[in-house]
Amino acid sequence: MADGNAKSYRDLVVWKRAMELVSETYKLAKCLPKEETYVLSDQIRRAAISIPSNIAEGNGRASMREYSRFLSIARGSKYELETQLLICVDLCYLTEEQISKAMMLGEEVGRMLNVLITKLGE
């Protein structure tokens, strides 16, 4: 169900940026205190992983409606991740500077998801 000229979800720029966001998130998770290993660290990694995973899963679905639904789930996970990163800042686990790259990638992914969802007719 690839959009436009994309042959696979792996050709989608939004998926590629979401994968970059996963990598950045994993780097940040390593900076969290040990007591957060199974709580906040795990949660931010799961939210980050959910973004490209849902883009890929939606791309493999049979209908544009299903594809759009999975892109919406990816967008929700993006907001979840941003919120969790801001919680890390509020708890003084990370600084605004440390999360800035992830936040910028998240904003970029969000804009691309919005465009793709609109193109698919939702």
Image (cartoon, rainbow, N blue to C red):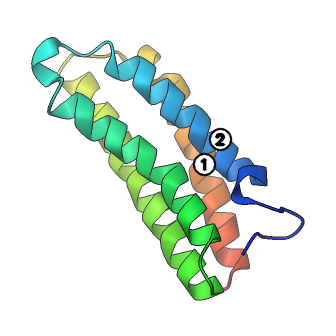
User: What is the x, y in percent for residue 119?
Assistant: 73, 77
Please indicate whether residue 75 sits to the left or right of residue 32 in the image.
right
Type of amino acid at the residue the image marks with label 2: Arg
The residue singled out by tag 2 in the image is: 17
Question: Residue reaching furthest right?
Answer: 5
Of all residues, the one furthest to the left in this rendering is: 35
Q: Residue placed at 52% from the left, 28% from the top?
A: 23
Q: Secondary structure at mark 2?
A: helix
Residue 83 lies in quadrant: top left
Q: Quadrant of the N terminus?
A: bottom right
Residue drawn 86% across and 70% down? Answer: 4
Q: CA distance from mark 2 to mark 1?
A: 6 Å
Q: Position of residue 103 (x, y in %)?
A: 49, 34
Query: In screen coordinates, is 49 left or right of 95?
Result: right
In the rendered view, would you say 101 is above or below 78? above
Rendered image: mark on residue 109: 1
Q: Which one is in front in this view, the residue at disc 2 or the one at disc 1?
A: 2
Task: Indicate the position of residue 71 as horizontal and vertical percent values.
Answer: 54, 67
Image quarter of the C terminus:
bottom right
Q: Residue at 67% across / 85% down in the picture? A: 121
Verify CB contact (< 8 Å) between mark 2 and mark 1. Answer: yes
Amino acid type for the residue under numbered disc 1: Val
Under tag 1, what secondary structure?
helix
Expressed as whole percent of the image width and height from the top left, the position of residue 107 reads 56, 44
Label 2 environment density (alpha carbons within 10 Å; few <14, some 14–19, many ≥20) = some
Q: Residue at x 25, y 29 (%)?
A: 41
